[in-house]
Amino acid sequence: MTTQTEKKFETVIGLEVHLQFKTRTKIFCGCANEFGNQPNTQTCPICLGLPGTLPVFNRTALEYAIKVALALNAKVSSTIKFDRKNYYYPDLPKGYQISQFDKPIARDGFIMIPTASSEKRIGIHRAHLEEDAGKIIHDSDIKASLVDYNRTGTPLMEIVTEPDLRSPQEAYDYLTTLKLILKYLDVSDCDMEKGSLRCDANISVREVGETILRTKTELKNMNSFKAVKIALEFEEARHRAVYLAGETITQETRLWNEIKQMTVTMRSKEQAHDYRYFPEPDLVPFIVSTEQIDEIRQTLPEFPEAKLNRLKNQYGLNDYDANVLVQEKAIANFFEDCCKIYQEPKKICNWLTGAIAAEINSRNNDIVQLKISPQNLTALIAKVENGVVSNLVAKDILTMMIDSGQSADIIIAEKGLAQVSDDSALEKVIDEILAANPGVVAQIKEGKDSAKGFLVGQAMKKTQGKANPKKLGEMITRRLLNA
Amino acid sequence: MSLNELTAHEILGLIKTKKTTPNDVYQSVISAVREKDSAVKAYVRTCENNADLATLKADAKFPIPTTNKDNICISGHETTCSSKILAGFKPPYDATVIKKLKETGALFVGNANMDEFAFGSSTENSAFGPSRNPWNLDCVPGGSSGGSAAAVASDQTIWALGSDTGGSIRQPASFCGVVGVKPTYGRVSRFGLIAFASSLDQIGPLTKDVTDAALLLNIISGYDPMDSTSINEPVPDYTKSLTGDVRGLKIGIPKEFFIEGLDPEVRQAVEAAIEVLKAKGAVFKTVSLPHSEYSVATYYIIATAEASSNLARYDGVRFGLREQAKTLRKAPIIDMFEETRDAGFGAESKRRIMLGTYSLSSGYYDAYYLRAQKVRTLIKNDFDAVFADCDAILTPTAPTTAFKIGEKTDDPLAMYLSDIYTISVNLAGIPAMSLPCGFSKAGLPIGLQIITKHFAEETMLRVAHTYEQATDWHKKVAKV
C-alpha cells in the first residue's frame, strides 16, 4: 500500500496562444490594423457590425495563416471555411465572432523545444483564424464601462498544443521557442504587453503511470511568459494539494491575479457558454490549391534552429554566441552582412552582442532603425584591430556614429581621436608623469610592478585616451630600466 | 390615366419624347401617396423633401420614383426593418442596390412597411401595424414585402424593391396582383440588406409588369466585391429576353404542388395559364419534386438558426433602442441586453430567435440544423433533376388568395404554410417570379409562379412576358 505522501505526480499542460497578425488592414474590412490609436478611430460600419454590412476576407491574413501553419509543420486545410461563434458581450459588435470550428486552417503540427539534454517534440493540435474582439475599459470615475472597437476585427490565429507539456518550465520554453519562430515569420509583433500575443493554459495533474487525463482547469489573464510559468506552478501545486487532501478538482476557468500571485475562480463548467457554432453563411467556403501553398512555402524564412546550426558551422561560432545572435533575426542578418565585408566573425559577434546590444537597449530601438551600417561597423572594428583607435575610444566613437549616422573616419578626424602613435609626443607625456609622481616611481624601482598601472592610467588621462595603453606600458618600463 | 399609374418603361418613353418630366412623375406619385396611404399604409416613412430630384442629372437613365423596403439601407435615412429595436437607426452607407439605383437617377419615394425583420407573410408583424391589400382593405397584402407590393398595386409608386427569403417578394406580389422577382442567390448584392437569413435572402423587384421587372433587374444585378456570396457572372440585358417566343420550351408541373390545401380557384387559374402557354407553343409535362413536403420544416430550421445569430447585434450597445432595467437582476449589462431585446422585438421575432437558438444548441445541432442542411441538398437535387429535362417549372405562387387581417395571427403554422410553394426555391438558391394570372370571385388577385435553374432569369422572364402579352390581368387596377 502506498501512503498518500508517497504519490508521484505528473503535470499535463496544453497551451492556447492567440496571435494578432500585423496585416495592414483588418481581417474582414479595410480599417487600419494598428495598436495604440485614439479609441474608436479605426472603425467602420463593417467592423462595428452595423445592420446590413458583410465581411470580406483579407487574403493577406490567409497568407500569414498558411505561413504559420507551415512553420508549425502542420497540415494545411485545402478548404477555407468560417463559422460563427455566438455569444453576447459589449465588445463583440455582431453578437458572434467569425472563427473556424470544424475545419481549422492547420492541424497536426509540431515544434521542437530545447531541453536540458536535447530537444522535445510538442504537438500542435490545431491552429485557426478568427477576428479579435474590442476592448472594454471600466472607468470608475464616471461609473461606466467604455468600449474601444479599434481592435475589433484584428486578424487573430489561435494555436492550440496537444497536452504534451509536462512542466511549467516546458510551457515557458515552448512559448519562447514558438515566439522566436513567429517573429522570424514576420507576421506579428508578438508583443504580450500590447496584446499581440496572448496565452491561456490548460493544466491537470495525475499520478505517474496513469494514462487518462484528469480534470483540467483553464488559466487566463497572464500578461507575460513568466506569469504563465508562475501561474502554472501555482496551479500545479494547488492540484497536488487537492489530491493529497483526498479531494477532487473542479473543471473551471481561473484567472491569474498578478498582484496576489494566485489563481481565482472565474466561471465553472456549468456557467460555460454554449457557443452554437454554425457555418458562417456570409463567407462562402473556398479552396486553396497546393500550388498556392507551395508558393507561400517558397517565401518562408530560414528558421531559428537552422540558422543557429548554420552560424556555428559557417562562421565557427560557439553555441552561446550563435544562440545570442539568432534571438533577433535582424541581428543575425546584420552579423552575416558584416562578415561579408570583414572576415572576423568572432570579433563582429563580440561587438554585436556587447557594445551594439547595449546601444540597442539604452535607446530602446532595434538594429534596423539604428543609424549604423555593416560597412561603418566593420570599418570601426578594423580601426581597432589596426591600432588606429583604442578599444575604449572605439566605444565612444560607436555612440557618436549612432547619434550622427556618420562614419568612424569622419568622427575620428573631426574630434582628433586617432591614437597618438608619435613616440616623441608620448615620451613628453611620460616625462611629465614620471616627474609628477616620484613616489610611485620609487615604489616601482623597489619592485612593486603593479604600481606601473597607475602611471599608465595617468598617461592615458593626459592623452584623453588617445594613446595605446600597451605601448605606454612598454615605454614606461623601458624608461625606468634605463633610468 | 395619371402619371403614377404608368409603368417605368411607359414613363421613360414619355420623358424621352418630352411629354413629361421626372418632376411631374414624382409629384404625381407623392400626391397619390398623400391621397391613398392613410388607407393602404404601404409606407412607414416617405421622403417628401425631394432630395433626389434636386440632385437629379439631366442625363439620368432611370429617373423613376422608386419605393424601398424598410430593410435596405439608404445612407442617412432611418431604416428600421419595421421594428422598434432599430428606432432612429440611420445607416451611414448605401446598400449596393441603392448605390446602383442612385447612379441611374432613382427618385426614392419612401420606405415600405414589412413584417418585422421580414419575419412573416402578411405585414401583420410590423411594429407600425399592418399594411392593407389595395384590392380589399380588410385583407393582408402578403409579406414580408407587403408594403412594397401594396405601394405598387395602389399606384403609390412606379416600382419597388423587396427582399425574398422564403417567398417575401413573390407571395405579396401574388396577393396584390403585381409582378415580383426573386433572382438567383448571388445575382444581386446583399450588401446593405439587413439580414434575416443570410443564405436565403435576395433582393428583387416588385413592378407593374414583366418589362419593368427586367429593367429593374438590369439595374440592381451584378457582382459586388463587398458581398462574398455574390457571384461573378455577367449580367445580360434582361429586356432582350422578352421575345414573346416560348415555342418548344419544356415546362414542368410538379405533382406535389397540386394537392390538398390548394384553393380550387387558384388551381383553376393556374390550369388556365398552362393552356395559354400551350397555345403559345410551350410543352408541358408532369414532374416530381419528392422532397417538397419537407421544405417548410427545413426552411424554418435554417432560416431561424441564421436569424437568431443575425439578430444578436441588436443589443442596445451601439445603435437603436436601449432599455435599462428598473432593478438589478443579473448584472447591469445582461439586464440591459434583456430589457432592450424584450422591449424591441415583437412576438414573431422572439419566436424565431428562440427556434433558431434551440436548433443550434449543443445536443440539438445534429438533429435539427445539420439534418436540415442535408435535406436542403436533397431539395436542391430535386430541382436539378427536373431541370435536366425542363426549362422551367410552373406552379401557383401561394395556395390561396389574400386572407383577412387577423385571420391567421393566432396560428403561426397556418401562416407559415402560405409560403409552401415559394420556400423550396430559396433553399435551392434558384430564381423564381410571380405574375398575375387571374382573380377570385371575391375580386382578389391570383399569382402564377415561374421557376428556372440558376442564372436562367432570361428564360423565366421570357415565359412570364409571353404569358403577360397573351392576357390582360396586369392591366387591372385596384381602386383605392
Image (spheres, helix red, strand yellow):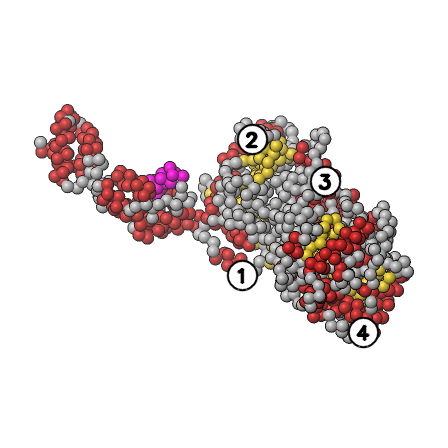
Q: Which residue, given by chain and number where applicable, does mark 2 sit on?
A: A257
Read off the chain for label 1. A
Q: Which residue, given by chain and number where applicable, does mark 4 sit on?
A: B280
Q: Earlier in the sequence, mark 4 or mark 3?
A: 4
Quick check: do tags 3 and 2 share a chain?
Answer: no
Task: Return the residue nearer the eye: B289 or B159.
Answer: B159
Read off the chain for label 2. A
Quick check: do tags 1 and 4 share a chain?
Answer: no
Task: Return the residue nearer the eye: A19 or A439.
Answer: A19
Rendered image: mark on residue B341? 3
Instruction: Report the side of A10 relative to A456 (left or right).
Output: right
Q: Quadrant of the C terminus of chain A?
A: top left
Task: Return the residue nearer the eye: B198 or A268.
Answer: B198
* Secondary element at image label 2: strand
Q: CA distance from mark 1 to mark 3?
A: 49 Å
Instruction: Report the side of B320 relative to A415 (left or right).
Output: right
Residue A352 belongs to the span the image colors magenta:
yes
- Do tag 1 and tag 4 residues touch (Cβ < 8 Å)? no
Question: What amino acid type should be assigned to the residue bearing mark 4?
Answer: Lys
Quick check: do tags 4 and 2 share a chain?
Answer: no
- Do tag 1 and tag 2 residues touch (Cβ < 8 Å)? no
Q: Residue at x 72, y 31 (%)?
A: B326
Dividing the picture into quadrants, the one containing residue B104 is bottom right
